[in-house]
Amino acid sequence: MTPMTQNTSSKAKTPSLKMMEHLSKLSRIKLSDEEKQSFLSDLKHILVFVEKINEVDTENVQPLYSPVEAFTPTQKDVAVALNEQSMDHSKIAENAPNFQLGYFVVPRVIEE
Amino acid sequence: MTKETGLRPENTVSELHRLSLFAIVKLLKKKELTVKELLECYLQRLEEDERQPRESRINAVVYKNKEEALKQAANAPADSLLGGAPIIIKENLHLLGYPVRCASKILSNYKATYSSTAMLRLLKNGASIFATANMDEFAMGSANENSMHGFVCNPLAKDYIPGGSSGGPAAAVAGYFTSASIGSDTGGSIRQPAACCGVIGLKPTYGRVSRYGLVAFASSFDQIGPIARRVEDIALLLEAMAGHDEADSTSAKLPVPSYSKALETPIKNLHIALPKEYLGDTVHPQIRRAFMQAVDFYEKQGAKISEVSLPNTDYALSIYYILSTAEASSNLARFDGIRYGNPSKKAENLSDLFFRSRSEGFGDEVKRRIFTGSYVLSAGYYDDYYMKALKARRVVYDKYMAILKDADLLMMPTLPYRVFKRGKDHEDPTEMYRSDVFNVAANVVGLPSMSLPCAKDSLGLPISFQFMGRPFDEALMLRAAYLYQQEHGLPVFENAK
């Protein structure tokens, strides 16, 4: 039990407004007070919706991360073009909102 | 309705749009048709659609590029599989120079800086890509109502949904704006819209088609696949895209059969299993009746039909919405408005830029899924939701594999409900999530699945059934579907004048 949830009779924990604020921060998505309430209500619905999963007996079952389990291929730590087009830096710069002297420009990071 | 054969229709220009991909390839190779006249026919139809008032505009296509398509067709290798034939792709697939907006404001200025492997393979096999199609934002939705480009109408009945998230690609095929299109399917996003629009859609086995260059939604679920009106067209496009790719380590190192050549191979001793959970009370009586008629067809063709139980069907939906949102919340973290995308103009510092760009750029459904994904992955909830769902995924996986040891194919209705009207107001987002109930299991388990129309309901809207097959055995599914098309016939929907 964490302070971000309220105790309920069901196994699912009910997220609080504080939790919604935490998720907003984790997700880097700003929410107005009204939006917080509305997304919180949606999240509650979704958690009740997926709660059914607790009925599955998963004792001694290993997690399945992907339908393809074979192996993780490794490769040398060198840049390779995955196809004839993927290494064209000038095109990448064209998409950048602010690209100068070979750098992506961002707003001030360190405050004076 | 002109039959979709290899013969050029008598009444040429006005009927060109009805040609199937297979017929187009034949005519192009015989030089009885040019890519240019076909493109002009499609583009004229699209322009006509653009002139319609919003409520009756299909709005399936969001970008056109005739010149580039003509170049691609001119560069098609001699004797290529597709001979220069024009197709449409979903707006989340990278093709150099084409916008890849994923129907999201956050990518409204983004153009592909490279091409996805699947698109490059299509070009090498002689496709020309003349347009991109509308979709639900970041492929999240089942009605194609979450899009910066506006909603898509079902060409069969304009006040009905076309399905989603590949609503644009499906509506483009059903509306005769193209013979075929390419979509992506994370939890039914090819099959559900295909079923809503009365066309055919196939989600390949996870790992069959390279995902390199498909904008990631849920990486362990996503697959690229074809949509068309004829089974042979689906076979051609899958053949053109499939196969191992070094750029996608999850793509399988397996040979790709010639699907189009395999179609006519007779099927012997076909065993089809019907999971009884997919025929429960939630299935509309008209759909059940049409579905059982399709089952009867296969029985008369000599297939063995058996009923099986998949008690985990309901869980697949929970597993899907936990894992796909978790993966999405991670995949969508890259959209910060710095290297590409649409940064907020109001940002005061770097952190503020992230917050503002994402808040302004993402739509509500995308935000909802990012929050859900962040929740199920966050400290204190990870084990109860994310880990629990991963374990349950194996339980479901094992059950499907056990049944497919014995049965060759699983068969079920694609949708338990009749196609519904646009603009439904959902108090609870899970009402829409439930519409994927019969579609998500194939993605949870990674199995190939294909939907094809088999009847019309009392309003003349399509009813479809779907197969799920063994991993990497798309060929059998295609052969079974081809048998149905040839011996029974697909329903013809009079629409799109």
Image: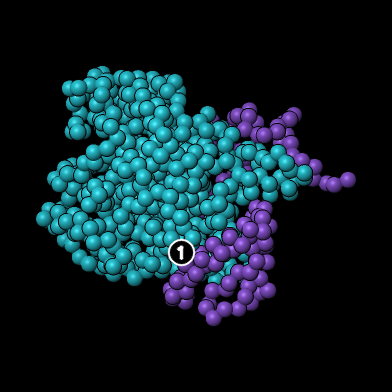
Q: Is residue B151 above or below residue A28?
A: above
- Element at badge 1? helix
Colour scheme of the rendered structure: by chain
Residue at horizontal 31%, vertical 49%? B195
Closer-to-camera residue (B493/B201): B493
Protein chain holding label 1:
B
On screen, residue B55 above or below B465: above
Taking depth in this image into account, of B218 and B116 the one nearest to the observer is B218
Quarter of the image where the N terminus of chain B is located: top left
| Chain letter, cyan | B
Q: Is residue B187 above or below residue A60?
A: above
Neighbour tally class for label 1: few under 14, some 14-19, many 20 plus, Cα within 10 Å: many
Question: Which of B253 and B403 lies nearest the eye of the viewer?
Answer: B403
Kindly tell me whether residue B66 is visible in this rendering. Answer: yes
Q: Dividing the picture into quarters, in which one does residue B10 lie?
A: top left
Q: Amino acid at mark 1?
A: Ile
- Give the residue number, with chain letter if any, for mark 1: B319
Specify the chain shown as purple.
A
Quadrant that contains the C terminus of chain B = top left
